[in-house]
Every structure is written in C-alpha cells, then in structure tokens.
Image (tube, coloured by chain):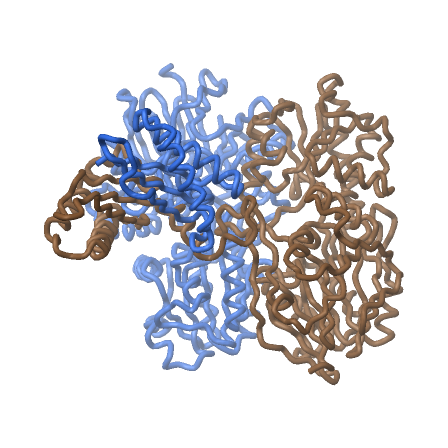
Chain colours: A brown, B blue
Amino acid sequence: MSNTLRIIPIGGLGEVGKNMMAIEYDHKVLVIDAGLMFPESDMLGIDYIFPDFPYLLDRDDLDLLAILITHGHEDHCGALTHVLEKLPTSPPVYATRLTGGLLEVKLKAAKLFGQVRLHIFEAGDLLRFGPFTVEPFHQAHSIPDSVGFGITTPAGLIIHTGDFKFDYTPTDGHPPDFAKLAEFGGRGVLALMSDSTNALRAGWTPSESAIDEGFERVFRGAAGRIIVATFASHISRIQQAANAARRHGRKVAVTGFSMVENLKMATRLGYLNLPPDLVIPLDQVGSLPPDKILILSTGTQGEPSAVLSRLAQGRHQQLKIERGDTVIMSAHVIPGNEEMVGRTVNRLIQRGADVYYDPIEQVHVSGHPSVDELKLMLNLVRPKYFIPIHGELRQLTQHARIAEKVGIPRENIAVVENGTPVEFTDGKMTIGERLPGGYVFVDGAGVGDVGPTVLHDREHLGRDGFVLAIVTLDAESGDLLLAPELISRGFVYMPDAEDLFAGARDRILQIISDDGQSTRKKQAERIEAALEKFFRQETGRRPMVFVHLNAV
Amino acid sequence: MSNTLRIIPIGGLGEVGKNMMAIEYDHKVLVIDAGLMFPESDMLGIDYIFPDFPYLLDRDDLDLLAILITHGHEDHCGALTHVLEKLPTSPPVYATRLTGGLLEVKLKAAKLFGQVRLHIFEAGDLLRFGPFTVEPFHQAHSIPDSVGFGITTPAGLIIHTGDFKFDYTPTDGHPPDFAKLAEFGGRGVLALMSDSTNALRAGWTPSESAIDEGFERVFRGAAGRIIVATFASHISRIQQAANAARRHGRKVAVTGFSMVENLKMATRLGYLNLPPDLVIPLDQVGSLPPDKILILSTGTQGEPSAVLSRLAQGRHQQLKIERGDTVIMSAHVIPGNEEMVGRTVNRLIQRGADVYYDPIEQVHVSGHPSVDELKLMLNLVRPKYFIPIHGELRQLTQHARIAEKVGIPRENIAVVENGTPVEFTDGKMTIGERLPGGYVFVDGAGVGDVGPTVLHDREHLGRDGFVLAIVTLDAESGDLLLAPELISRGFVYMPDAEDLFAGARDRILQIISDDGQSTRKKQAERIEAALEKFFRQETGRRPMVFVHLNAV
C-alpha cells in the first residue's frame, strides 16, 4: 500500500489527535505536535502523560522526516523532550518563532538545548519533506504565532487546522488567513482535520479583545492589589493584563519560574511589549501602595503547588491574600479540575479577596471555535472528506453532525479514536485497523515505569487501604514463634479498631492450629482469604490484604 | 441570650445550609432538612457524607422539637436515618406527602420504618412547635411537593426558601405560591434565607415544561430503543419521559431498585400517572421491537456501579447497548463528576448509541433559580436581613452582590460558612462564633470510623503506594537471620525494579551492620529514613515506608 496516505491520531483514550498525529505516505512520516496531557482523576499520583507511539518505533521501514509544531501550548509541544528521547533517530523540529522560543525555554530547563535541530518557519513559508509539501498558514488562537498546515501529498491536499478561532480582532492585530483557507478550498481539498474542542458550544466564540473590557471593569473597581492568574504560556493574556496595569498606573510583578522565563523570552522576541519601568521584582510589592500593584501568577487549575493555591491556603512565603485584594482567574478550567478550582476560589473569598472568573465577569474567553466558526471553516475549505480532531468522542460526533448539516455526506466523515488510521487510496477513504498505543505516564523522575498494574493498586489502596499480617513460625515445628502482627493504613482508624484486629488475629491463630500440615504457601493463601472475608463482613470494605509468613 | 434567635447552617466546607440547618430560640430548636452529600474527589473511598452536629449533641439545655424536610432529594433528606440514629432523643419528622413517601422507601430499606414519628403536612398548614409557628408554602422545584417555610419566631418572621425555581408552567400544574410570598413581604420579614445554587447564572431558568419539547425532538428522531437516565427521585422527569413514550407508542421498562420502588410509591400516592399497560418488566424488553421501547435508568453521574455505566462498559447482565440506541442524559452533572460523566458518554457513543445531553439538546433544565428569579424572590419577600444559603462561598458572595443591587444594605447581609451562627437580638443581626462541626464519612458499613488520618493515608497510598521492609534479627546477637524482604504496591512496577529494590536492601544491610548497638526502635527509624531518602532520590516519589523489625 505504498500509494496509500495514512492519517493517524496517536495516543490512548481522550482527545483525538490533540497531542500528536502522524501523516504517512510511502514509508515517509511527518509528525504534527508532541504534546502532553494532564492525567484523569483516577490516574493517581501521575504528574502528566504523553502519547505512546509503538507505531513509529516498531516499524523499521518508516522514515520520520520531521516534527512540526502548531503552537506553543503544553498539550501540543510539552512532551517534545520525552518524544525525542524515545525516538531512535533525532528528526528536525519545526516551529514558528514564538513557539520556538517557548520550546527553547523548555529544552534549556531539560538541559537538552543545543542537541535538538530546531528550525524556525513563518506562516506563508513552503516546507518540503520527501513526498510532502507543507504550507503553514496563520491561525488566530489564544497564543500568538499559531499555525495550521496545508499538506500537499501524492494523494491530495490535506488541511490540519491546529487549534484556532475565527477572531476578527485578535490582540496581536493578526486576524486569521481567510484568503489562504479559501485558496486551499479553490485548489480542492482531499481531507480537512479540524479542531472540535467547542463543537458543543453554539454560536461564535468572543474575540480575545473582549477580555480588555472585562479587565477594564475589574481594574476600575479594585481598591487594593490585583492578581491576574493565567497560564505561563498565555503571552497575549499577559500583555492584556500588563496593558490594563499601565492604564491604571499599576506596576507588574511576576511570580513563578516558567512565567518569569516565558516573559523574558517573549519580550526579547518582540511578542510582549513591557516597558522596563512597568515591571518590578516581587520583593518590592510591599513597598508600593496596594492600588499600584498587579501580580501575575499561575495556578488557574487549582494545582496544589501553584502560586495561586498557595496564596489561597496561606502557604506562600512572600505574599498573603488580604481583604481588598482582587483576584482574576483568566483561563478556562481543564475538565476534571472544576472541583479544585472551585475550592481555590472559595478559599480566596474566605481570605477576603474579591474573585472574578468566567461566568461573573468576562475575564476569559475560549481560544477554540464554536459551532458557527466550524461551519465557516468547512465552507472555506470545502473538503471532500472530513476528520474531526481535537476532542473526545462527544465533541467529534457533534462536529460530524455539524459537517453533515454543512453538506459533507455522512460516509465521507471519519470519526475515529486515537490509534485508528484513516487511509486514502485512489481518492477513497477507508478506516484502518486500530494500531497499538496508549499513554506513557510520568511520575516524579519516572517516565513509563508506572503502568496499569501500579495504577490499579494505587486505586485499590486509595479506596480501602491495606492490612498486612506478619506471621512468624518455627521452621521445624510450624508453631507460632511470635504473636501475629497486623500493620494497616488507610483502612480504619487503628486506635478505634482494636476489637476488629483482635478478631483478625483470632482468625489467623485458628488457621495455623487447624492447618499445621499444609505448605506455607497454602497457609498464607488461606489466611489471606479468611482475612479478606472477615474484613468485608465486618466493615463492608475490601482492603488489600497481604500475609507474610516467616519461618525461622 | 434567651431572647436571641440563632440560625445555624450545619456541616463543614461545601454548600452552606444545604444538608441541614438549625433554628434556635430560648433553648428550643427546629432542624430543617437532614441530607447527605457526595464526597469530594480527594475523600478517597468514601461513599457519602453527612453533617456532623456536635452543637446539637453537646448542649444538654437544647430541646429539639422537630425535623422539617423541604423536599425529597437526597441532599435534603438522604441522611435522615443516620441523623436519627445519632440523636439521643427521637424528634418527630415532618414532610409533605410525596417527600414522606420517599422517606418511607428509605426507612423501609434501612429497616427503620415504624420507629420514626413521621408526620405529613401540606403547604398552607400551620404547624406550632414551642416558640415557633411554621407556615410551609408551596415551591416549584424539580420534584413535586417541595416547600419553603415561613417561621414566625419571637424575634420576627424568617423565610427559608428551600430549593426552588419560579416555574410558571411546572409539569404538575402547580406554580409557585407568589401570593403567599407577597403576603409574607407585607407582614414584614426579619430575614430571608434563599437558594444560591444558580447565583452565577444570568437570566431565568427555563421551565421544566421545556423538557417536553426536547424529549419530543429526540423521540421523533430515534429509530431504536431509547434509554432515559435520571435520578430515581426525579418523579416529574420520569412522568415526562413516560408521557413521551406514550405519545410515541413505546412501552416503559424500569431498571434499578430505588427507581422501581420510588415509581411504585409515587404511583400509589398519585404523583405519577402510569397506566398499567404502559409499563413492562425489564425482561420483556427483548420481545418487542426496539422502536417500541423506553428504558428508565439511573447513572447520570457516571457512578461506576449504576445501570448506565454498566451499559456503557458492556457489564450489564440483561441489556446491551447497540448501534441505533438513543440515550438521553436527563439530569445535571454534580460538580466533580464531569470527568466520569464525560467518560460514560464517550463509551456509550463508542458502542454505537446516539447520546443527548444538556448542551446539545434541551433534555435537562436546572431546578434552581437564576439571577432574575433571585431578584424576584428578594422583591416579593422584602426582608430586612438576608442570608444566602445553598451554595459554596462563590455562589453566596455572588447572591450577596445581587441582594445589594436589589437594595439590601451590605451590612444587613450575612455570608457565613457552615457552623457559623447568624444571631438576631432586639432586631439586630450579628455573626456568632463558629461552632465545632464538620462531616461524618460513610464508608461501606462504617459510619464515622474514617476520619482525617485514614483519608490522609489513603491519599498518600493512592499517590505513591508503599514499601514495607521486613527485617528479622536474632534477638541475642542482633544479626540478620533472614535476608531483608521488601513488599511494595502502587509505587513502581516491581518486576521492572529489581535494581531499585536491590539497592534498598543494600541500604538496610549497611545500617544493620553499622548500627548493631542501637535499640531496635532506633534501627527501624534509621532504616525508614534511609529508605525514604533513597526512593525519593532514585524515583522522585515518596512512597509510604514502613520497617518491621522482628527479633526471634
């Protein structure tokens, strides 16, 4: 099938093609994005995850030509260092200038800078890789210098939108490239892959400029310090907050390593305009009146270790929330984080802050296209086939319904999950067999050493705790040498459960005396089963039970 | 302070006064509601929680006159059996007819029916309890027979709205009692306590009748079976689904114990109108064509053991989701459950179902008042003082802002957390000292035996797992009798971590040989510290480490 074009979203469950995609033709592969995901709430103890790609590693016949990055958000480029470390070859990485700057910060932090061939391109360039000709085109999104890709392949022209919104008044004055999209449409597009994040949201996403009005209202009403929390990579939002500070005679102090580094980089590259006298070091915040201060921080997701959560809990070394402070949560809440974010807001209010966030003030807008924008994209590009990407099945099926309404025949739409290739041969689309894949878990210093078994045990331990019985026997007689000891955590409060554990010890003694002739393995198994049953009956819970039989 | 009226929301963090409130005057107490809460996501392994009320238990001088229930939802009456079991006296319980019916089902399931003095009242009745005269008034909500309470106390008239919405066209044809609210307003109201759940939502909540249109659209388009998922107590929604089934010639099958029981009870009491030929047993579903079937189920929150989740995972014994099935999620998502619900929807789609839920079709509306309704309530009742309830601090502060806009002076508004009494003496409001309290955790058969220590251990075990070292020494010489054994779960995948554990065993041997003269307790502590440090350095994680030193 060397004349087959394959489009493969890479990863496990979750948002399809969000973190990584592969485009394959005649044994040549382009990879688009290398991003990370935050763990779902039952992936206990995991810091973050990134796509696994045995597809790329196991096939010797494949030639990986390049990794192209659409934009500088973590979910699209945050796993680059891990991906490069796993790959046997070191393909060149292509990114726009700001995205490249953000990658540079990351590579330096990972001590990998200089080892990666990082190429900077601009929207409008023409990049050639084997059978592929790539035309990056400018997209408006919530970070500057975002692009989508038109990729001419021997099978036809395919379009990858990247993340986008049709923002007529973006903060950087650089609206979407409607002309290019229409021109692609005129050329004839085989397949469109388009951002489905907001496929459940009717209408049109407000412009990033709408934030300026929200900030203005809050800044006008704030008598004390203002803290604006956003993502460290949200360069345009940082500019908007800084502009508001300047209008209201406030100085800007920045907290957090990644935000400080990104600010320096983006200022150097000209993507941020912060006059030197606007910015003050964090330790000078106390020397100015509160109404002259704006603090920029991270922590919009309620992450326990981020600056905002530490402020909310009174655990920040330099800063303390005081009555009269105003906090602006200027970011969307990543699904799964609603509860932690809500708690952070409650705690900030408890400490006396006025807190502004999405439903009560326009201090954040989505960076993704709503339904009417999706329809416009489909109308501009007029693809023969359509592959909704960047969403879970919910969003993808809704995006498919939208495409049907716009006139794409149902049989020309491919809703697939990560790992399932969409193949084009002789102008016809088919869905391939699902390839192996999933996610690599990163936990502390460990990359990939935590898998389903460990997660399953964590879930079990987290739910019901464990009980360990240590039984020491005389190796010859099989008699007990010491009273059985029980160690337990996370099951019941031990000081209040003496009767329960006394009962458990009785069960052990009984089995030992009944069962002197069994093998030790059998005895241990019998004790384990008896204790599991006993604890379930007595408490309705199922702690992990281990028995350690020592013979001395 | 016997001439002081105290209003006390009971519980810990979370929604204020949602599950339980106390009204105290001259040592006499009325309790309003006795509900349960679902655990937050870091309360690992907990089934549900309910308010702790040492305030009521520790004060011998208090006389608990009655427990009044506003309506039949779990968060307002689901903990009644636990509350009654904890109280030293057995106060009478007052509820409307449908709420009483739902309590009866619960009491029977807990084998407590007959032991509780359950009194049925109607909206419009006059109930006298010591110094209190209670006037229950009809409220429209998402369950029939909901009430609020006007309570005349020696300090003045106070109004508790219960949960409500201003629904002009409720499905039971029984709109809110505007006349009564206005009449209270005319009499002069000391304080209003009003539902804040939707204080962040602008406008007016759609009528429950709007669901009929949503159901109609989905039923018209469905070629196969339809499954409507909702709460078992959502009697009016069940009626709406049954009506749609009847209009479209479908029979209704019901799954799940609580839904079956509630249906029987509500039909008997006349709150549900289900002709006998409409309902079929679940095992007859297979004998009718798919387009003649409606299945009612629970599981709208993605609870792993509920019918809908089992269907989504292919783990239901009698039913299997097939291509062409339609699933309607007709309930709101309780905050914190978004991820599990999203996953359930994705899985249903994966199995071929068309799934309809709130943003893509009007198959659910909130049962709570939006901002304009809150303003109407404040305008009708015209209270001197205002206490927003039924919300977290976020919602309460926003409700307070709304009340200020409506003309209540800021100093007459009390935003308090659970446990903090609002006191009225000589017509003046003050905020009292916070009383002890919190939540009781229910885990399996255990009520209150899991506390902060156990939860903290579960969180630790769930995040990083544990390592247990078993070291057996000769009691006399202090020499090792057996090689140290390491047991670990939830930390690393042991088969791949042989080197790591070999390193850990070396650390143990070293300490034993260096340290033969220490006490055993000291040795164990040194080993523990060394292993914690070693694992942290090697893996960046912090498993719980235990050392068990046996001397034989």
Q: Nearer the viewer, residue A280 or B216?
A: A280
Quadrant of residue A30 in the image?
bottom right
Q: Nearer the viewer, residue A416 or A517?
A: A517
Q: Is residue B184 above or below residue A42?
A: above
Q: Quadrant of the N terminus of chain B?
A: top left
Q: Quadrant of the C terminus of chain B?
A: top left
Q: Nearer the viewer, residue A104 or B260?
A: A104
Expressed as whole percent of the image width and height from the top left, the position of residue B514 reads: 38, 29
Report x, y in % for residue B47: 37, 47
Q: Residue at x 85, y 70 (%)?
A: A184
Q: Residue furthest bottom?
A: A426
Q: Residue furthest left?
A: A514
Residue B151 location, quadrant? top left
Q: How far across and how far down the image is residue A476, in percent? A: 14, 48
Q: Position of residue B173 (x, y in %)?
A: 47, 56
| Residue under the point 41% across and 39% down | B544
| Above or below: residue A378 compared with residue A295 | below
Q: How many marks?
A: 0
Q: Position of A254 compared to A474: left or right?
A: right
Q: Residue at x 30, y 50 (%)?
A: A542
Q: Is residue B349 visible?
A: yes
Is residue B91 among the parts visible in the rendering?
no
Q: Is residue B480 above or below residue A163?
A: above
For residue A27, side relative to residue A496 (left or right): right
